[in-house]
Amino acid sequence: MSPADSLPQEQQAARVLIDLLQQEQAALISADIDSLTMITERKTPVVAQMSELATKRHRALATLGHAASEIGMQAWVESPQPGQAEHTQAAAAWTALLAMARQAKEINRVNGLLISSHIARNQSALNVLRVQTGGGNFYGPDGQATARGVGRGLVVG
């Protein structure tokens, strides 16, 4: 097996991941929580597939005496090979895959910022509610609603 054999599949998976990350970004912008759940469920197997394909590529690199990593792949595409035309195509496919990985990483970074923004907004809303209700938590550490007595205490006796 050549380290380049999995590159077309890796590129396809990267395209799917980028599309899902863009959908995730749109859902985050519109606060569409239901869509976010579905997108996450679809994203998980794609990431698993990408990991599996990278592992196969790493094994092929190790068999050829290169480091089983992205650095090893870069060294492999930069080394002269007997089938130069095929190797040139592999180098182009690798470069394209790296560009897709950078794009996915950037979209994911922006999505993380959007998530942080939603968390901050929700925390601010909770803080306003806490002030209006006299402070305290609505939920305990176990996620269950805390009982709050309203009114005055009753003294018996």
Image (cartoon, rainbow, N blue to C red):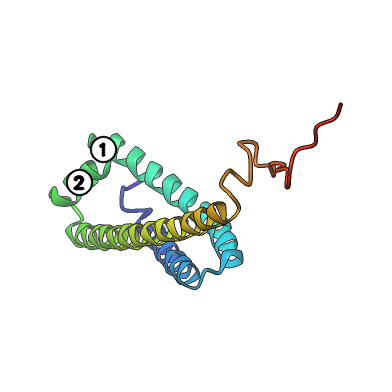
Above or below 112: residue 52: above
Looking at the rendering, which quadrant does residue 96 occupy?
A: bottom left
Q: Nearer the viewer, residue 104 or 84?
A: 104
**Residue at (37, 46) in percent of width and height:** 54
Horizontal and vertical percent for residue 124?
A: 46, 57
Residue furthest to the right: 157
- Relative to 106, is 121 on the left or the right? right
Horizontal and vertical percent for residue 131?
A: 53, 53
- Relative to 73, is 133 on the left or the right? right
Looking at the rendering, which quadrant does residue 36 occupy?
A: bottom right
Q: Nearer the viewer, mark 1 or mark 2?
A: 2
Residue furthest to the top: 157
For marks 1 and 2 on the same chain, the one whose residue lies earlier in the sequence: 1
Q: Amino acid at mark 1?
A: Leu
Q: Residue 64 has which mark?
A: 1
Q: Nearer the viewer, residue 84 or 145?
A: 145
Q: CA distance from mark 1 to mark 2?
A: 9 Å
- Relative to 31, is 9 on the left or the right? left
Q: Amino acid at mark 2?
A: Trp
Above or below 25: residue 133: above
User: Marks 2 and 1: in contact by CB < 8 Å?
Assistant: yes
Position of the N terminus, as image quadrant, is: top left
Position of the C terminus, as image quadrant, is: top right
Residue under label 2: 76
Residue furthest to the front: 157
Above or below 35: residue 81: above
10 Å crowding of disc 1: few (<14), some (14-19), many (20+) = some
Q: Secondary structure at mark 1?
A: loop
Q: Nearer the viewer, residue 125 or 63?
A: 125
Horizontal and vertical percent for residue 43?
A: 51, 57
10 Å crowding of disc 2: few (<14), some (14-19), many (20+) = many
Q: Residue 3 has which mark?
A: none
